[in-house]
Image: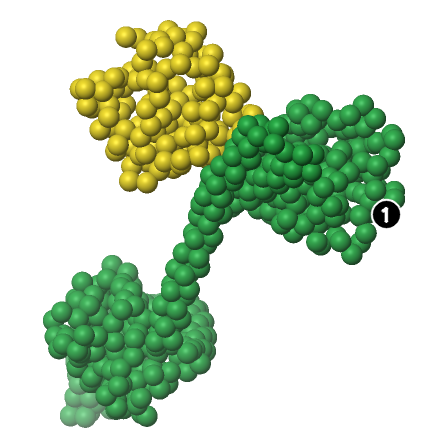
Amino acid sequence: MKITNKPILLVEDDQVDVMTVKRALKEIHVTNPMVNRENGEEALKYLRNPQSDKPCIILLDLNMPIMNGIEFLRVVKHDAQLKRIPVVVLTTSEEQQDKVNSFDLGVAGYMAKPVDYRQFVEVMRTIDAYWTISEVPH
Amino acid sequence: MKWSVENKVLAGFVVALAVIAMVGGLAYQASYHYIEMSKDMVQNHQDALVSLEEIYSLVSQAESSQRAYLITSDESYYLQQRQAVVSRIWERLAWLKQISPGEPGRQQRLQQIEQRLAARLDILDRVFALRQTRGLDAAREQLLSGAGRAAMEQLHDSVDFAKNEEKNRLKEHTEEAQGYAERILSTLSATLLFVVVFMALLFLRIRREMGERRRAVEALQQSSARIDMLLNSVAEGIYGVDMQGNCTFINPAGLHLLGYQEETELLGKHMHDLIHHTRANGSHYPATECRLYCCLQSHENIHVDDELFWRKDGSSFLVDYWSRPIESNGEVNGAVVTFFDITERKQAEEQRVLLVHELESANEELRNFGYVVSHDLKAPLRAIGSLADWISTDYADKFDDEGKEHMRLLISRVRRMDSLIDGILQYSRVGRVKEVAVAVDINGLVREVIDLLAPPENITISIVNSLPTITAEPTRIQQVFQNLLSNAIKYMDKPKGEIRIACGAENGQWKFTITDNGPGIDQQHFEKIFQLFQTLAPRDRVESTGVGLALVKKIVEMYGGHIWLESTVGRGSTFFFTLPRTTATSS
């Protein structure tokens, strides 16, 4: 990541998936702190809390209880304070409709979670590489 | 003004009668005139002839009387007779003149006769005077001189001439009258001929009219019989109402549906009050609100299928009815109502709606099932995969070879489970997720698929003839070729593999063939291979989900095509499938 002091917000309810992301990030030596929230609503609370650090990137699952990823995106992308934070969707869904909805809501990327952990590490490596090169507004 | 046939015929008869009356009148008048004229004329001429004869003979008589007097000197008889005869002569002459006012010729001749008569009588007088003054001898001498005879001859000539003239005139007049009569006769004949022709034409016209009328009556009878037959044979109830809503007729089916026996039970009755008095919810249905009654007033066609009709026994049935106004001479004078009992139909409809609804929800559940199950299965699977990977990495030094092998198998089964779930997802997506159908060039598409599959060098894939362009969802068509070709590649058992793709038009469809020289398939498996999750090779040898052919079949059949195969074990297989030539769109 270009900015190393800002946290990465992971919106994900599956504990093993959280572990997977953490492990993969560690494996590729990403040092940013990681904040995990279990659903969209919790994530919004975090983002709107003035005490919390604004994340440099949001990794978002779509299938979640209470407030799913698409609903979360709808809120975030209509919030002037939050809409410029890049959101990368990390999901199991390969549904065309989910992809269309996500891109309509201005996501920065859409990654399918591979079942194979090695492949997953590669996905995370690519995301890191991209956001190391890409400029982001402050 | 347009004349009706009756008026025309009547006018024809009036004209004919008028002509006949006119002709008759004229003929009568002419004949009467002719007869009268002829009678007068002939009488006149005959009178003239007779009078002339008489005058001449009277002169002779006067002569002889005088002669007798001359000889006898008998004054009392012969002289008186002579005087009487002379006065009679003048009298006749005066009469003749009197009956001849319009005859200038005759007047002239009479004048001559008068002169000669006077001359003759003068001679007679002179002889008579001589006899009285100088005696018989002097008179005889005078007679002998022949003056009297000469005058008499002159008179005779005049009278003769006059008589001839009279005869000629008589003849002339007769001829003239005959000519007149002939003209009248010919006019009469011509007119009668005209009347005969006119009457004949009139007769023909009437006959034709009667023929037409007879045919019209026959046609009317036939059509009336047909209408009766129709009314009697249709299953729908049909009745007619006048403008007040009273029954004018009802057919047997109508009677039956309403539970009546005889038409007379309903004729003249107010139909609304009898069969339409209560609404489906049990409330009173006033005639003023009745849709049948309203359409009668507004001259509209209506169709109603949500009301009740009531039978004679007080039961009711759901009815479907139409009402149409009856027009006669441009004026609406009632309506015809067609109806039938739709109780069963309504029930069937309700059942159908229920069934369709059930089916739809079952279908919807199924669709969601595939999707949800796949997603929800994947998350724990991924967790198992990740955890197994970490264990085998983090505790690599703690595992012996057998433990490592078990971990490898565990991870490979996770991958297989993952591809099975992907297969279900793919399979359930066909028909659920719609893409826009576009023109797809199969030539290009097949080449892309071959590139994607990257067949090993010992396998050649050839396109035998040019493949068509069809309208379809590109992804689906790609899936068809990709699965069929990847199967052919995956199972190839020959050192030199050959796969050929061809296409031809057949019965308005495209028929594609994909032929390989692989292991072939036993005929007993032909059906099984198209079923979901069915594979013929053990999964450990050939990694396969058993979704591919099921997916291909689903796609082909969705486009209205068929898929089948021919195969010889050891020699190879040919897969056939058809797609419609016309715009192929998924239903």
Residue at 26% in and 78% down: B309
Q: Position of residue B155 (x, y in %)?
A: 31, 70
User: Which colour scheme appears in the figure?
Assistant: by chain
Quadrant in the rendering for residue B519: top right
Quadrant location of the N terminus of chain B in the rendered image: bottom left
Quadrant in the rendering for residue B329: bottom left
Residue at 28% in and 60% down: B2
Q: Is residue B149 left or right of residue B485?
A: left
Colour yellow maps to chain: A
Q: Colour of chain B?
A: green
Which of the two residues, B21 or B429, is positioned nearer the viewer here? B429
Q: Amino acid at mark 1?
A: Val
Judged from the image, the secondary structure of the residue bearing numbered disc 1 is loop
Q: Is residue B251 left or right of residue B410?
A: left
Q: Residues within 10 Å of mark 1 (few under 14, many from 20)?
A: few
- The residue that label 1 is drawn on is B569
Which of the two residues, A42 or B60, is positioned nearer the viewer here? A42
Which of the two residues, B276 or B461, is positioned nearer the viewer here? B461
Residue at 31% in and 13% down: A6
Q: Chain of mark 1?
A: B
Q: Position of residue A117 (x, y in %)?
A: 54, 29
B99 over B261 or under it: above or below: above
Quadrant in the rendering for residue B352: bottom left
Which of the two residues, B291 or B408, is positioned nearer the viewer here? B408
Q: Number of marks in the image?
A: 1
Q: Position of residue B58 (x, y in %)?
A: 27, 82
Q: Position of residue B341 (x, y in %)?
A: 34, 77
Q: Can residue B116 be seen by looking at this rendering?
A: no
Q: Can residue B341 be seen by looking at this rendering?
A: yes
